[in-house]
Image (tube, grey):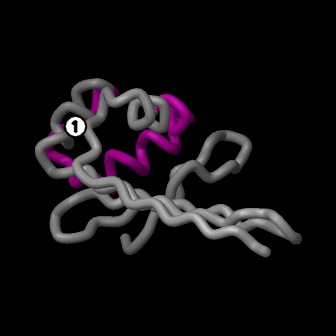
């Protein structure tokens, strides 16, 4: 599984998830349209040490690979809760990268 869309029941994508060097990488991009708009990209890295906490919180099998766990969250319509856990800091993000540009 190369990349997985973490999206809500209405199909809105929160993140694109993949595994990179044993860590969960979450990415999203927003593209501005027109003069004065901005485009942005965010990449969050969640270390493997957080995987058991994620499994425990959502009552999932800790022996499964993390991408299967994330896929299960999406199928169970819990992507919004997972996103909230990232934003509020319940799930520790080891590295945050952001890039923003403005259209002149």
Q: Give the range drawn in magenta.
A: 58-81
- Quick check: is 71 in the magenta stretch? yes
- Quick check: is 8 in the magenta stretch? no
Q: Residue at x 57, y 49 (%)?
A: 14
Q: Residue at x 34, y 54 (%)?
A: 96
| Camera-nearest residue between 93 and 99 | 99
* Residue matched to label 1: 61
Percent across and percent down for residue 56 are 22, 27
Left or right: residue 59 compared with residue 98:
left
Q: In which quarter of the image is the C terminus?
A: bottom right
**Residue 16 visible here:** no
Query: Residue reaching furthest right?
Result: 34
Q: Quadrant of the N terminus?
A: bottom left
Q: Residue at x 25, y 69 (%)?
A: 20
The picture quadrant where one finds residue 102 is bottom right
Q: Which residue is drawn at 50% across and 44% down?
A: 74
**Residue 102 visible here:** yes
Percent across and percent down for residue 2 are 38, 74
């Amino acid at each position: 599984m190369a990349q997985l869309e973490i999206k809500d029941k209405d199909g809105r994508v929160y993140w694109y998830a993949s595994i990179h060097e044993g860590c969960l990488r979450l990415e999203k991009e927003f593209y501005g349209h027109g003069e004065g708009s901005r485009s942005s990209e965010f990449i969050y890295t969640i270390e493997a040490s957080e995987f058991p906490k994620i499994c425990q919180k959502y009552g999932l099998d800790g022996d499964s690979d993390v991408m299967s766990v994330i896929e299960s969250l999406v199928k169970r319509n819990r992507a919004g809760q997972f996103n909230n856990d990232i934003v509020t800091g319940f799930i520790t993000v080891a590295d945050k990268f952001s890039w923003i540009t403005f259209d002149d």
